[in-house]
Image (tube, coloured by chain):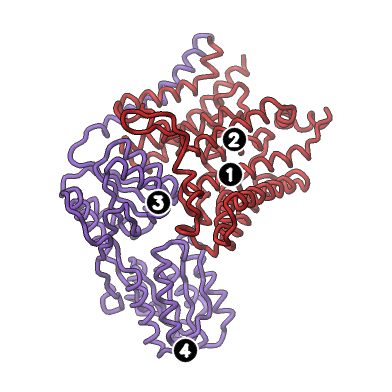
Chain colours: A purple, B red
């Protein structure tokens, strides 16, 4: 009995250790430049696209890429930057607002490790941020709506100001709609995105449809990204109001949105960011920085494209 | 010796984890700088877990610590935007934490709602309040006073290593100080002894003359303030406040306390044990990141380690019980 208890204690230690030894063995073999990609938003469809494109380009460049997802935790991004700085990576790619991770950027700067932003934000400590022009995308869709509804009628907006790249889209749409005296913004909704954004947007839209029962009282729904647009579409179809000519636009043109646009219903337009282009351009930008080039522009825009039923598929 | 091994098996597991990382990362893991990094990285979780320990001692728990952390950060940041000086805004955020904790206490202890239900409800309320106050926006940049943001970037100079200064981060100092305070409260005061008595057997404690209702209520006050402090530390670390930023703290704090409980003699929540639990989570994050282990694999591993430690501890207790 005495002996078995002793063994149990030791066993506990050994089991915990064994798992790590197995794991570490694979990671220790390194070759080429080590690049860490750190993001709190990997579960977002767009983020996945550009991380994959980054990895593909990095593979061609012979880099070893470590993708780290902190699942929405911004402070953990700082921690993970500190970790990879300690590990001694050659470069760091981030996908989060740099003003919130200053401590991590300081750590990277102190160790002379270059940081490139992938749809992040501009900061003096970032060599360059590679992204789409959010102002431009919002201008394209909000003007699309203004033209489609003849510059008059009620418009519902779905925005998300807590996330700066989406916040700038709302600013432009505000300005465009304000510029048409006969366009009335009925509501500016911030949906709960913890479930992905579709379900709550649908619920909010259903409430608005109930509050505005007159056909034609809602002319359009402008969404700062696709999920609320899809939720609004579901709400409009469920309410049987799909033939009132309500125009819906999104931004990002994710696969689900493309399907909806191709189907020719109320969801008429979205803007495709070139996520693949952002990912590969970020890798190329990092390659330029590692090659010793000093970049002039600290924001590099990758072109976007309006998606309608003509080119949705 | 036998008793030592039985009680400290998990502890040895922790040591083994450290040794494995040390062996696999000979140059970068066991350095003063990396360890100071780790203590800073886990400082917020330490405060949240230590605060969570107080209610768990009584046998309750608090699901609202994460949203309270978010709310306190938002309260301070909103007050900053209104031009309040840093100490006043921070003080107000702590008052909000205390009030929120006491509301939980009243719901659980006076009204008698199950802690799970009561704090689940306040979780959504505090989270909603954070969204209302902030308008859903992240408050950052010039709205956050430099001195508040600098707190998380600076520390106590300890001397220098080579050409670089070694600094004990203020976040670490604060986490240590709060751990010390809660240690004194739980381990060295009659108040703490009574909380443990309630956790052991609330009815027996009541019959022995312990004011169970009042003590359970006040325990939530500690947790509320602790959550608020953790939220302020988080806000300082990221130099911004976002209505969802504390969310990750709650589950990790509970996990750390449970992990710590496997170290203690009777499986009770203990402050020092909770800190050990936090350290395990922090060391895993740090080491596995440096080893370039996939972040999702890391999540699974952390869960596995918790399960492993808790099951072995449970089996061990059953074996002792039979004897």
Mark 3 secondary-structure assignment = loop
Q: Whole-Å distance between the Cαs marked 1 and 2?
A: 9 Å
Callouts 1 and 3 close, C-beta under 8 Å = no
The mark that comes first in sequence, 4 or 3, is 3
Quick check: A127 left or right of B195?
left
- The circle drawn on residue A40 is 3
Residues packed near mark 1 inside 10 Å, few (<14), some (14 to 19) or many (20 plus): many
Task: Tell me how many marks there are.
Answer: 4
Question: For the residues tagged 2 and 3, is the chain the same?
Answer: no
Q: Whole-Å distance between the Cαs marked 2 and 3?
A: 29 Å
Callouts 1 and 2 close, C-beta under 8 Å = yes
Name the residue that disc number 1 marks: B229
- The circle drawn on residue A181 is 4
- Chain label for disc 2: B
In the rendered image, the vertical position of residue A141 relative to residue B66, given as above or below: below
- Chain label for disc 1: B
């Amino acid at each position: 009995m005495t002996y078995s208890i002793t063994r149990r204690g030791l066993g506990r230690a050994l089991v915990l250790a064994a798992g790590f030894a197995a794991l570490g063995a694979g990671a220790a073999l390194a070759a080429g430049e080590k690049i860490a990609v750190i993001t709190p938003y990997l579960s977002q469809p767009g983020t996945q696209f550009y991380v994959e494109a980054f990895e593909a380009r990095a593979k061609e460049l012979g880099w070893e890429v470590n993708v780290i997802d902190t699942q929405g935790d911004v402070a953990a991004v700082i921690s993970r930057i500190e970790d990879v700085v300690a590990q001694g990576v050659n470069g760091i790619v981030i996908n989060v607002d740099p003003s919130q991770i200053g401590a991590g950027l300081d750590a990277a700067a102190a160790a002379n490790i270059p940081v490139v932003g992938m749809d992040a934000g501009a900061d003096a400590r970032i060599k360059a941020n590679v992204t789409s022009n959010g102002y431009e995308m919002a201008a394209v869709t909000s003007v699309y709506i203004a033209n489609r509804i003849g510059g008059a009628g009620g418009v519902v907006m779905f925005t998300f100001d807590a996330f700066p790249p989406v916040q700038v889209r709302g600013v432009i749409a505000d300005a465009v709609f304000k510029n048409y005296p006969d366009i009335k913004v009925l509501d500016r909704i911030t949906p709960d995105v913890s479930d992905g954004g579709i379900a709550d947007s649908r619920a909010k839209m259903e409430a608005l449809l109930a509050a505005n029962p007159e056909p034609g009282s809602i002319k359009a729904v402008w969404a700062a990204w696709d999920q609320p647009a899809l939720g609004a579409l579901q709400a409009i179809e469920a309410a049987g109001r799909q033939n009132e000519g309500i125009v819906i636009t999104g931004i990002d043109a994710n696969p689900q949105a493309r399907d909806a646009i191709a189907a020719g219903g109320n969801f008429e337009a979205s803007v495709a960011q070139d996520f693949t282009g952002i990912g590969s351009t970020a890798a190329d930008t990092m390659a330029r920085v590692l090659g010793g080039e000093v970049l002039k522009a600290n924001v590099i825009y990758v072109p976007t494209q309006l998606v309608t039923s003509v080119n949705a598929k | 010796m036998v008793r030592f091994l039985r009680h400290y098996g998990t502890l040895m597991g922790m040591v083994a984890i450290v040794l494995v990382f040390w062996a696999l990362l000979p140059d970068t893991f066991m350095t003063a700088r990396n360890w100071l990094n780790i203590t800073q990285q886990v400082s917020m979780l330490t405060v949240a877990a230590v605060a969570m320990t107080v209610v768990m001692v009584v046998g309750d728990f608090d699901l609202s610590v994460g949203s309270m952390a978010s709310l306190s950060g938002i309260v301070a940041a909103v007050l900053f935007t209104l031009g309040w000086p840093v100490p006043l805004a921070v003080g107000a955020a702590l008052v909000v934490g205390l009030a929120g904790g006491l509301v939980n206490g009243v719901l659980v202890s006076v009204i008698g709602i199950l802690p799970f239900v009561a704090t689940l409800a306040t979780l959504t309320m505090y989270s909603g309040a954070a969204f209302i106050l902030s308008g859903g926006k992240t408050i950052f940049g010039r709205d956050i006073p430099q001195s508040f943001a600098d707190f998380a970037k600076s520390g106590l100079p300890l001397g220098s290593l080579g050409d670089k200064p070694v600094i004990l981060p203020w976040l670490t100092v604060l986490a240590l100080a709060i751990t010390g305070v809660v240690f004194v409260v739980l381990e060295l005061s009659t108040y703490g002894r009574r909380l443990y008595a309630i956790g052991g057997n609330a009815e027996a404690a009541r019959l022995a003359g312990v004011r169970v209702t009042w003590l359970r209520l006040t325990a939530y006050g500690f947790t509320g303030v602790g959550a608020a402090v953790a939220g302020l530390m988080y806000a300082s670390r990221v130099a911004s406040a976002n209505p969802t930023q504390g969310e990750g703290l709650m589950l990790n704090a509970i996990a750390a306390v449970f992990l710590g409980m496997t170290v203690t003699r009777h499986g009770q929540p203990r402050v020092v044990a909770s800190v050990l639990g936090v350290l395990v989570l922090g060391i895993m994050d740090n080491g596995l990141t440096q080893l370039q282990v996939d972040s999702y694999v890391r999540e699974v591993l952390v869960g596995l380690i918790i399960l492993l430690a808790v099951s072995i501890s449970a089996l061990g207790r059953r074996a002792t019980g039979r004897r």
